[in-house]
Amino acid sequence: MTTRQMLRRTGYVAFMAVVLAFFAVPMLWLASAPFDSDPGIGLRWPDWTLANWETTFNHPYALGSLVNSIVLCVVATAVTTVLATLAAYALSRVRIPGRDALLYVLLLLSSVVTGTAAMVPIFVMMFQLGLINSQYATGLVIAGGMLPAAIFILKDFVDSVPRSYEESARVFGASPTQVLLHVVLPVARPGIATILVWAFVQAWGNFLLPFLLLRDVSQQPAAVLLRTLKDEGGSANLTVIPVFSLLYAVPVVALYLFVSKRYGFRFHGGIKA
Amino acid sequence: MAGIELTGLSTVYPNGVRAVDDLDLSITDGEFFALLGPSGCGKTTLLRTIAGLEQSSSGTVLIDGADVTRLEAGRRQVAMVFQDYALFPHMTVAENIAYPLRVRRATKQARQEAAVRTSGGLGLGTLLERRPAQLSGGQQQRVALARAIAMEAEVLLLDEPLSNLDARLRLEARTFLKRLQRELGMTTVFVTHDQAEALALADRIAVMSEGRIRQVGSPKEVFQRPRDTFVANFIGSTPMNLLSAIVREGHLEVAGTRLPLPPGVQLTDDTAVTVGIRPEYLRVDGGGEGITGTVSIVENLGVTSLVTLECPDGALVGLTVPEQDEPAVGTTLTAAPEPGRLLLYDGETGVLLGS
């Protein structure tokens, strides 16, 4: 190995180490700070204690907000997945004029008119409907924002399910419901699993809509509450935040691992890609 | 078991294409019937109309004497095997085979029994727990057949049953299919664009083009006496010679020579006709009146060779000769049609004369 090669290799490894550290340090903080008797912003070997956990569990809103987050996400994810699946199937199989244009316009509008742009009208509408401080209503609004993209992605999955599968089932006497339950849903399952996880993660991290529509602290999800975790002096409450952050990360990781193991984010063999 | 009766059947697609056009056809009970034609001739649409997957625009479909024209697919007692087999990838072989029973909400035990019973006869007994992706093409086809049989329908429809298999397997599957059909005695209709497949498998063949039937008959009839030049051209591994000719003084003037008119055909002088003669029915050794030309190309077909003669007027005539009699290129040959094998078609309409 020449000196030049060695230098190049050393430079490469050093560069990668810096990049990795950039991503790894926050993770290490998340792993160590919750167990440190005096957690700070910096990274250090913890002085082991579980006192932070006790404080967090005794916090009036911390655990409640995680439950709120789960309720909100389950509503938003369920509505998105079920409606997107049905809509994607219909749009994939029924020939209507301007179908693709409709899909593209929906997708375009939903990415241009984001929550931020539609913030005021959404708030006014929900206020007039008397749905402020309703978790279910907020879940519906979040689902509405995710539906176009979900339909768009799922339609691609459903398009790749050969029509002959459904026709075959029909010839054997299956009703439309049976065709859907026995053939289309199982074959499109990896796509549905993908949408499910995507929708859950989107809703879990959504700050703006719950912040606007859930004014009552006891109703707020974790993403919103995190902002208000401050001590009496008004600076960040570093006893609660590390533990809370760790708890906040757990459901998403768990869901990803579960779905990946159970359904796999890929296609079944047998379908020609 | 049941026959199929199609009367005045038309299937028109929303874009106005008449895929099946005012078609009458009768398929008898237990028959192995082929729908043959080039791609786009409407044969698959016809099959799908019988299955109920396409709605006919007019006409009626009778199965076992009952009018099923407006009946949904799945209520017609018709089973179908698709070109891509359409095996459900998320189900095992056993689940696939027993699927028709699952639709009818049969018990788990009944389904398992049906899967075991049906798969045994098709040599799939050891594969029941596999998934379709783990099977070879031939095995997949047999699973698709087993599933269709498990439905216990009156009629079996096969869409291009051999087209997804490689050449070697296709021959095996052909023999297998024919034996299976004999054993089941089920009325079976299959679609193919391969004339050799239709001739080998079917009891009767319907040759289709542009949504209409050009000829219905046994493989022998269709091969020996094609009713028009379209069928003549389509059937046969080596294409039939179709030569334009003119009637003069009770003889045919064709390819620069004179041939006697076939017996029983009365034509006035100067009538334009098309002479049809299969390469297999031309003999070199016979002497007598024949078509003379120079050997321009010799193609080896295995047991026989296809010789192309170039006639004085430029027409090309093909004939097959046994391998040991292969002529050298450039020699002059006279080929005479076997008695009764020469067919005459109307010069304009292309319809067989004297039939």
Image (tube, coloured by chain):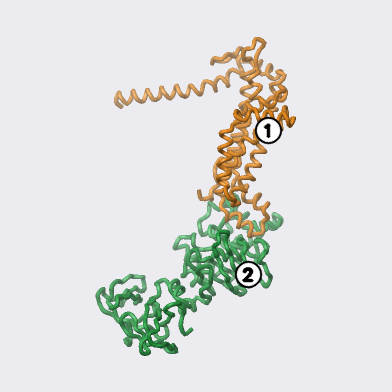
Chain colours: A orange, B green
Q: Residue furthest right?
A: A130
Q: Taking B31 as reference, is B235 left or right?
A: left
Query: Disc 1 to disc 2, how far (Cα)?
Result: 53 Å
- For label 2, the SS is strand
| Element on which disc 1 rests | helix
Q: In the displayed image of the protein, which residue is found farthest to the left?
A: B330
The residue located at (62%, 12%) in the rendering is: A235
A77 or A263, which is in the foreground? A77
Amino acid type, callout 2: Gly
Percent position of residue B265, x then y = 44, 88
Q: Position of residue B179 (x, y in %)?
A: 55, 70
Q: Please identify the quarter of the rendering in which residue A190 is found.
A: top right
Camera-side mark, 1 or 2: 2
Pointer 2 chain? B
Amino acid type indicated by mark 1: Gly
**The one of B40 and B83 positioned closer to us in this rendering:** B40
In front: B125, or B73? B73
Residue A36 drawn at (x, y percent): 60, 15
**Residue B59: assigned label:** 2
For the point 70% across and 18% down, the residue is A59
Compared with A83, A36 (above or below) is above
Q: Is residue B98 visible?
A: no
Q: Which residue is mark 1?
A: A139
What is the chain letter for disc 1? A
Name which residue lies at 73% across and 30% down: A128
